[in-house]
Image: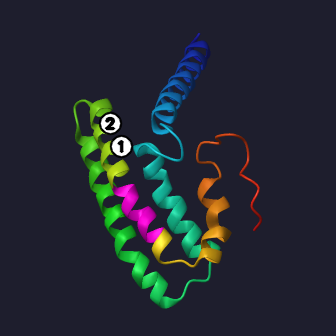
């Protein structure tokens, strides 16, 4: 009996996570391109990882990128503290996603301003993979 309860609890938890994730995914996937706060929350990590490990940036490029990403990371950390302390976590998470969606354009602008065109082309697959799989696997361009 106890194992049945555990099994049903596990199945229910997986189902809830799937439903919540699909709702957030659909909401974050908004009109065209990567959008939404949840996407922006994950984009922060993907972008910094792609820049740090996918490219050989100059010291000047890193110095130019770092403040924007540090600010974004600190904002996300503070926002998530607020979410975790909130009574209504769903509403707090909506606010957090809206906050991150407002920050994402700053990251995008720095991403277009600092790396060279060749560097941007090289990391583009890293920025889009796993980020919502809209329309299959990437649009043609080489490495």
Main secondary-structure element of the magenta-colored stretch: helix
Q: Quadrant of residue 103?
A: bottom left
Q: How is the image coloured?
A: rainbow
x, y percentage for residue 38?
A: 44, 44
| Residue under label 2 | 94
Instruction: Name the image quarter holding the C terminus.
Output: bottom right
Is residue 116 positioned above or below 86 on the image?
below
Q: Magenta stretch?
A: 103-111
Q: Residue at horizontal 65%, vertical 68%?
A: 121
Q: CA distance from mark 1 to mark 2?
A: 5 Å
Q: Quadrant of residue 128?
A: bottom right
Give the side of residue 3 with respect to residue 139, left or right.
left
Circle 1/circle 2 CB separation < 8 Å: yes
Closer to the camera in the image, 138 or 41? 138
Is residue 12 positioned above or below 135 on the image?
above
Question: Under tag 1, what secondary structure?
Answer: helix
Mark 2 Cα shell of 10 Å, populated few (<14), some (14-19), many (≥20):
some
């Amino acid at each position: 009996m106890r194992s049945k309860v555990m099994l049903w609890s596990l199945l229910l938890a997986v189902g809830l996570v799937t439903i919540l994730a699909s709702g957030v995914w659909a909401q974050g996937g908004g009109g065209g391109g990567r959008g939404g706060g949840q996407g922006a929350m994950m984009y922060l990590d993907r972008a910094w990882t792609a820049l740090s490990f996918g490219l050989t940036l100059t010291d000047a490029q890193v110095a130019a990128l770092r403040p924007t990403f540090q600010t974004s990371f600190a904002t996300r950390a503070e926002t998530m503290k607020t979410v975790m302390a909130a009574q209504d976590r769903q509403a707090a998470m909506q606010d957090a996603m809206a906050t991150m969606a407002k920050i994402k354009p700053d990251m995008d602008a720095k991403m277009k301003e600092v790396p060279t065109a060749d560097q941007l082309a090289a990391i583009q697959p890293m920025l889009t993979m796993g980020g919502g799989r809209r329309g299959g696997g990437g649009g043609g361009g080489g490495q």
